[in-house]
Image (cartoon, rainbow, N blue to C red):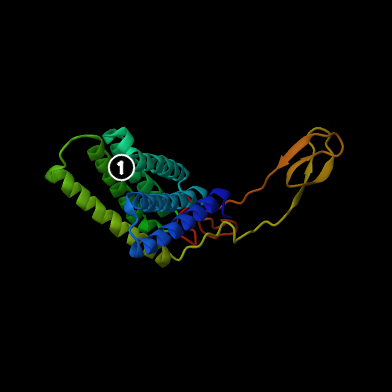
Amino acid sequence: MRAGYQRTFLTATVVALTAVAAMGIVAVFADLGDTGMKILATALMVAAAGIVSLASATAKSHRHGLTANGHAGMWAAGLGLAGALALLWGEDAVGDWEWLARTVACLGVVAVAAPHSGLLAIARLRPHMEWARVTTWAATGILTGTLILLFLTDMDAGVAAEKTIAVTAIVVAFGTITIPILHRVSGLSDMSGAVVTVSAKSISLGCPRCGKQHELPLGDSECPSCGLLFKVEISENRCQCGYPKYGLPTTVCPECGRDST
């Protein structure tokens, strides 16, 4: 189910991209001038922020995604957009805002890295393929930390930092391409909502206060005799991949191959 904020980000992104396209067409036939170029840059920034925010919202709302990464990505995108617009439209009035430019650059890195890692968590991989995801996460963390350190300090990148950025960027690109392929090869589906071994909507139980037997619905209810409140919940024992363990002749999940012992 798509959350409201996802629809908001999607709408904002579509509107911004439409504005960018329109401004681009106008720029072909007319001289936009400085103000026109700033408007075009603003639309591009809003579109970029909308895309990463939408990715962050997806990572946040998906049951296998990383909620913290989703929040971090959305906050970084919003604050980065505000700072970038302040730099774009307020440079003449304020002057040198080097500290803000450094901050915006760091926020931009986080806005991309956070949802990227969160979306990688959604992929359904078999246990022996998890190395690809872990390696990509590690490379993303190193690349993000290195870039932020360079943006926040006056330290010269140097050969070591350049090689670190190049190597980790290659690993991240490799993982970004490979993990969706491994997801497809794994052939795992989200079984948690598709396979149900218990379909009861009520349960028969004895009230611990009055001792009378009643048929009570799942969820919140009360004893018809004495008014004792109940909160009835049932859940199935499932593997990490969502496959139900009920009736399995072995401890090894037939869906993902994990051993639940």
- For numbered disc 1, what is the local secondary structure? helix
- The location of residue 23, given as percent across then percent down, is 40, 59
Residue at 40% in and 54% down: 120
Relative to 224, 154 lies left or right: left
Number of disc labels? 1
**86 in relation to 259, above or below:** above
Query: Local crowd at mark 1 within 10 Å, few (<14), some, or many (≥20)?
Result: some
The quarter holding residue 207 reads top right
Horizontal and vertical percent position of residue 61: 52, 49
Residue at image position (39%, 51%) is: 39
Instruction: Read off the residue under disc 1.
Output: 105
Up/down of 148 relative to 177, above or below: above
- Tell which residue pokes out farthest to the right in this image: 225
> Front-most of 178 and 85?
85
Q: Residue 158: percent from the left, percent from the top? A: 13, 43
- Quarter of the image for residue 184 reads bottom left
Q: Amino acid at mark 1?
A: Ala
Please state which of residues 145 and 220 is positioned toward the viewer in this rendering.
145
Q: Is residue 240 visible?
A: no
Q: Residue at x 72, y 54 (%)?
A: 200
